[in-house]
Image (tube, coloured by chain):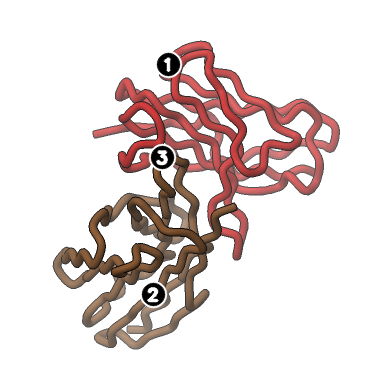
Amino acid sequence: DVKVTQSSRYLVKRTGEKVFLECVQDMDHENMFWYRQDPGLGLRLIYFSYDVKMKEKGDIPEGYSVSREKKERFSLILESASTNQTSMYLCASSLEAGAGDSPLHFGNGTRLTVT
Amino acid sequence: GQQVMQIPQYQHVQEGEDFTTYCNSSTTLSNIQWYKQRPGGHPVFLIQLVKSGEVKKQKRLTFQFGEAKKNSSLHITATQTTDVGTYFCAGNNYGQNFVFGPGTRLSVLP
């Protein structure tokens, strides 16, 4: 069974801090994604990657960056955390190259609070 | 850009009643996926629909894809407390990434 592991379940950071959210998948999936989930807004795509060292902006990339140095690991970076980045962050992976039509496998999420 | 809407936002039903959530896209979709997120959990893939007018069933769950491939529905027959959660549709616009709807939160009263 696919396992997507996010390093932290809960995180509290101060405004202006640099924040790293880590995600690892164990099924050799090509695609990895970072979403944020906010009540009433569903899941919004921040960044995605279809291959190592490849990254593409999603719908709401402002204030974020990503890194994919290894196939199994996809990191989300908040360069200077702000209170409006308080949210649930979900990492996901999928098998096929490109957007395709593979199901997304999600991690358990990281609830980030920026104070 | 592509937008995906879902109604209702919330639904409270008595156990044993039926439940339906509707998903509408602003653009024609190549395929649509449905996910369920239990309280405190993460979204879990339920099913994918690809063909115009497609209907798929999973036990008490029936999924439909509209003829124009712009809308979809999920119907649960005789809800149980285990059905509690938020149901999301996610539409794919021919090779683009999936766009998620805001979800319908289902509460089932025993």
* Location of mark 1 (residue): A71
Inspect this view and state whether residue B45 appears: yes
Residue at image x 45%, y 61%? B39
Residue that extends furthest to the right in the rendered view of this protein: A16
Q: Using residue A29 as the reference point, say whether residue B2 is left or right of it.
A: right
What amino acid type should be assigned to the residue bearing mark 2?
A: Thr
- Chain A is which colour? red
Residue A38 lies, in percent from the top left, at: 62, 56
Distance between the alpha carbons at the discs numbered 1 and 3: 21 Å
Residue A52 lies, in percent from the top left, at: 47, 14
* Disc 2 and disc 1 on one polypeptide chain: no
* Location of mark 2 (residue): B21
- Chain B is which colour? brown
| Label 2 element class | strand
* Location of mark 3 (residue): B95
The chain holding disc 3 is B
Residue at image x 41%, y 28%? A31
* Mark 2 touches mark 1? (CB < 8 Å): no
* Disc 1 and disc 3 on one polypeptide chain: no
The chain holding disc 1 is A
| Label 3 element class | loop
Q: Using residue A76 as the reference point, say whether residue B35 is left or right of it.
A: left
Which mark is nearer the camera, 1 or 3?
A: 3
* 3 or 2: tag closer to the N-terminus: 2
Residue B84 versus residue A28 in the image, above or below: below
What amino acid type should be assigned to the residue bearing mark 1?
A: Lys
What amino acid type should be assigned to the residue bearing mark 3?
A: Gly
Inspect this view and state whether residue B47 appears: no
Residue A97 lies, in percent from the top left, at: 35, 26
| Label 1 element class | loop
